[in-house]
Image: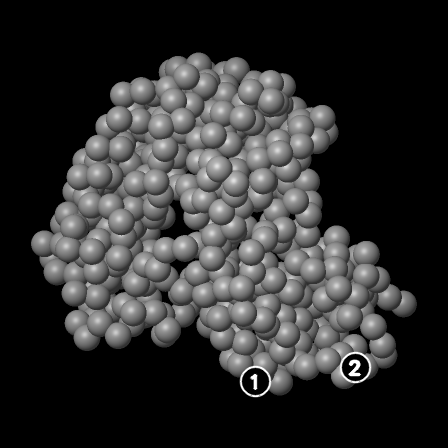
Amino acid sequence: MTNAPKFTTLGCRLNAYETEAMKELSQQAGLQNAVVVNTCAVTAEAVRKARQEIRKLRRENPDAPIIVTGCAAQTEPETFAAMDEVTQVIGNTEKMQAGTWQQIAKGPDFIGTTEKVQVDDIMSVTETAGHLIDGFGTRSRAYVQVQNGCDHRCTFCIIPYGRGNSRSVPAGVVVDQIKRLVDRGYNEVVLTGVDLTSWGADLPATPKLGDLVMRILKLVPDLPRLRISSIDSIEVDDNLMQAIATEPRLMPHLHLSLQHGDDLILKRMARRHLRDDAIRFCEEARKLRPEMTFGADIIAGFPTETDAHFENSLKLVTDCDLTWLHVFPYSKREGTPAARIPNQVNGTLIKDRAARLRAAGDTQVRTHLAAARGKAHQILMENPHMGRTEQFTEVTFATPQVEGQIVTATPTGITGTQLTV
């Protein structure tokens, strides 16, 4: 008896998107009785978790070949090739190619004469495979990959070496994909990528992300809601600001890659913005769209971070009026310039600072919920009892609603981090 491959996804939304594509490719190739692990490399802890997951999957599937792919497989293939549990290691480019899965599916010995490691130079890749699947997610919200890779070299980040340089899906392909999703009943589409605001730099005429957003909203008039995932605020273009100001179908929620609130640390991170740039962007966006909410990534305990540096990060939470924080305790990542900085921050201090940032975020969420209560919201239902407002706030319903539909409701209560109806 044969079984379809089992997939485990670690890490970001883009990885989850690519897992869906791999499922289709492996199914088309006829692959059976295999386990595929799509890894993350964002921190040393992520790689440790990947190894732990692989060992667990081997215990659960003693006879199945285990294929390891994703960013950690791309950046340190030798780590996984050395594991007895691993049958094959394939890179981020290879995992999106039909030929790879056809080769893996061949023969009784699974590998045949192929090498255990199939990981090519990701920097030589010039295309992205965002068109392979028509979105994924719940029945209410679809994610569409429009970009992959990153041209920037932040000193703490290994991701460009896992994803390669920035490359974009052409606008026409994106629009056609979103039209198909709307025809299938999706009420919200989220544009996703590794460095979303670099979209278009490698395309003819070098369009900007704002051009893509305006084009989608114009050419897909039946799309009720368009959402943008994480962006780099310093790269936001005039058309995107215009869309924020004039397009109600573009959701008033932006997740910002800020990373820190102190200028010296931002320079040591090789970020391209300063503290005042972040504050100015938030003020301008909120002036154009008063209901705009912001999430942000912030790293606690970057090497050389003093108490004064950290206080600037803590103060940024209120200066930018951030609501949804993703706080990352700094994790030394071998292969990055930051790992070689001599003045590393004590681990206990890093945890304490991360906890203080999260507490500040919790306070911001409470303030946001209090302001949102008692107002009418358009809520996209993710399941019969929970949906999200335009600002990405969770709302729970006592009475079941239709999954995937947008309902108008006025929350009257608050439970934890959720509004209640």
Q: Amino acid at mark 1?
A: Ala
Label 2: state its secondary structure.
loop
**Residue at the image position 44 percent from the left and 14 percent from the top:** 376
Q: Amino acid at mark 2?
A: Gly
Q: Position of residue 171 (x, y in %)?
A: 57, 35
Q: Position of residue 210 (x, y in %)?
A: 44, 31
Residue extending farthest to the right is 1
* Above or below 273: residue 220: above
Residue 224 or 324: which is nearer the viewer? 224
Judge whether residue 83 can be spotted in this image. Answer: yes
**Residue at the image position 17 percent from the left and 61 percent from the top:** 305
Residue matched to label 1: 82
Q: Position of residue 395 (x, y in %)?
A: 48, 28
Residue matched to label 2: 112
Label 1: state its secondary structure.
loop
* Above or below 88: residue 301: above
**Residue at the image position 52 percent from the left and 41 percent from the top:** 204
**Residue at the image position 63 percent from the left and 19 percent from the top:** 222
User: Residue 318 lies in what quarter of the image?
Assistant: top left
